[in-house]
Image: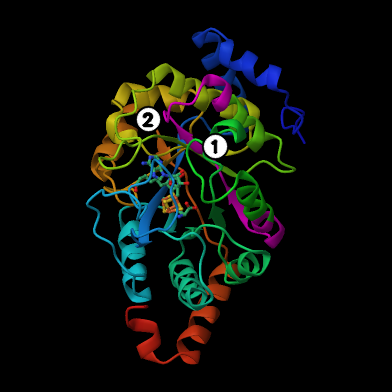
């Protein structure tokens, strides 16, 4: 394994990377990027909110928390059939991964049958699957892994030091425990954070240190720029200097050289030059499609035009025949085991 991939980063090293002159940092990030990836390929994932709003947690950035009046219309868990239709549309527009998100603290026992049916259904279309459902215990992580879920997204969001300013209803350790359960279940880990919440550069370094010093780096690292939503406590947060966002992407690339770094929420507020610079800094994944979970994202054809202008190709994904057969078998088992009422009617 390359000696560039390591888990013993120090605070001083992370701070020193952030302190590099911008051009030196960009050059270093791009140089490392080219040793691990084709610099002209970007992976694309489409998000789908399978359960929207009314979340009991108090994450200060989030439009879906029941504690803030953001005018968001709450929706119950989506029907399995509808989720599969959305996944078909995402596939037709060119996405290779379908990421399903629920505004839950953690899934309830009764939810598991529905979400595992969604995994099997989406996977049998030949898409990679990802879910973000809140905290998981070891049993729930195993159930999702056994259903064929490829990735689980659970963000650390920020540094341990700044975390308490943003969320009080679950601890940093709770998040680390979920990530450890996901890793042990055999699923791939997707974990990153949000910048622009009023944190300092040391907090951005602190977040990346946590991620890069895990026993194994997350395969996927989303770097979100805060989407300021009216009604949330962070609605009036001052803008982050765009160069500080780009520095965070570059340092993520350097500290986790083989991980996909995702240019995530916040692209709607970025111009195309800034997005191009993020790809130069080592970002090689985006959320694709008009909507994130509840807020707008650039239109799909605008992204395709940008890719064309930059000579960027979508990263291909081929589902293995074994995986496809397993998903189809699971789908048959799920549909046979449950009557149509269960499968096709809206879940409670
Ligand atoms: N409820 C689950 C949880 O929090 O684990 C899953 C969904 S939650 C919306 C997933 C992630 O979206 C959060 O961890 C956060 O990093 C990101 N997010 C939510 N609201 C955001 C916002 N306004 N701007 C940027 N990122 C946001
Ligand atoms: C992640 O890191 N960002 C995505 C995904 N994981 C689930 C979510 C972004 C949400 C932005 C606010 C919204 O649309 O509700
Ligand atoms: Fe709930 Fe997730 Fe939003 Fe936090 S980020 S309020 S847990 S939906």
- Measured Cα–Cα span from mark 1 to mark 2: 39 Å
- Residue 338 counted in the magenta span: no
Say what secondary structure mark 1 lies in: helix
Say what secondary structure mark 2 lies in: loop
What percent of the width, then of the height, locates residue 34?
58, 26
- Depicted 194 relative to depicted 340: above or below: above
Residue indicated by mark 2: 311
Q: Residue at x 42, y 31 (%)?
A: 197
Quadrant where the C terminus is found in the figure: bottom left
Q: Which class describes the residues within 10 Å of circle 2: few (<14), some (14-19), or many (20+)?
A: few
- Depicted 186 relative to depicted 194: above or below: below
What percent of the width, then of the height, locates residue 201?
53, 20
Instruction: Say left or right for 115 vs 89.
Output: right
- Labels 1 and 2 touching (C-beta < 8 A): no
Q: Residue at x 33, y 69 (%)?
A: 76
Residue 321 figure quarter: bottom right
Coloration of the structure image: rainbow
Q: Is residue 1 visible?
A: yes
Instruction: Say left or right for 185 vs 344.
Output: right
Q: Camera-side residue: 120 or 142?
A: 142
Instruction: Say left or right for 214 vs 228.
Output: right
Q: Residue 163: give its label.
A: 1
Q: Camera-side residue: 42 or 295?
A: 295
- Depicted 174 relative to depicted 149: above or below: above
Numbered-mark total: 2
Q: Residue at x 54, y 79 (%)?
A: 330
The part of the chain drawn in magenta is 181-204
What percent of the width, then of the height, locates residue 174?
62, 51
Q: Residue furthest top?
A: 21
């Amino acid at each position: 394994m390359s000696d560039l991939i390591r888990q013993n980063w120090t605070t001083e090293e992370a701070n020193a990377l952030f302190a590099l002159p911008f051009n030196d940092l960009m050059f270093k990030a791009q140089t490392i990027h080219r040793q691990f990836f084709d610099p002209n390929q970007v992976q694309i994932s489409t998000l789908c909110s399978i359960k929207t709003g009314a979340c009991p947690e108090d994450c200060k950035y989030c439009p879906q928390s029941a504690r803030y009046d953001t005018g968001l219309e709450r929706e119950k868990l989506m029907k399995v059939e509808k989720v599969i239709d959305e996944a078909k549309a995402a596939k037709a527009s060119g996405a290779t991964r379908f990421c399903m998100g629920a505004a839950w603290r953690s899934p309830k026992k009764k939810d598991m049958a529905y979400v595992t049916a969604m995994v099997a259904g989406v996977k049998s279309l030949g898409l990679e699957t990802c879910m973000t459902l809140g905290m998981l215990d070891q049993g729930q992580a195993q159930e999702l892994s056994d259903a064929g879920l490829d990735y689980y997204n659970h963000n650390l969001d920020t540094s341990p030091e700044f975390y308490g300013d943003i969320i009080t209803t679950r601890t940093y350790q709770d998040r680390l425990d979920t990530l450890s359960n996901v890793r042990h279940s055999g699923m791939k880990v997707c974990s990153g954070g949000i910048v622009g919440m009023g944190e300092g550069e040391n907090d951005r370094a602190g977040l990346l240190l946590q991620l890069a010093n895990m026993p194994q780096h997350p395969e996927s690292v989303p770097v979100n720029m805060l989407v300021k939503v009216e009604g949330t406590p962070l609605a009036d947060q001052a803008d982050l200097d765009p160069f500080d966002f780009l520095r965070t992407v570059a340092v993520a690339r350097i500290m986790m050289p083989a991980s996909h770094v995702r240019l995530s929420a916040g692209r709607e507020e970025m111009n195309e030059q800034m997005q191009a610079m993020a790809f130069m800094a080592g970002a090689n994944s985006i959320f694709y499609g008009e909507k994130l979970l509840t807020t707008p994202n650039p239109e799909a054809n605008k992204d395709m035009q940008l890719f064309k202008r930059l000579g960027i190709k979508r990263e291909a994904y081929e589902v293995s025949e074994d995986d496809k057969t397993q998903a189809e078998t699971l789908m048959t088992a799920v549909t046979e085991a449950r009557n149509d009422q269960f499968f096709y009617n809206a879940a409670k």
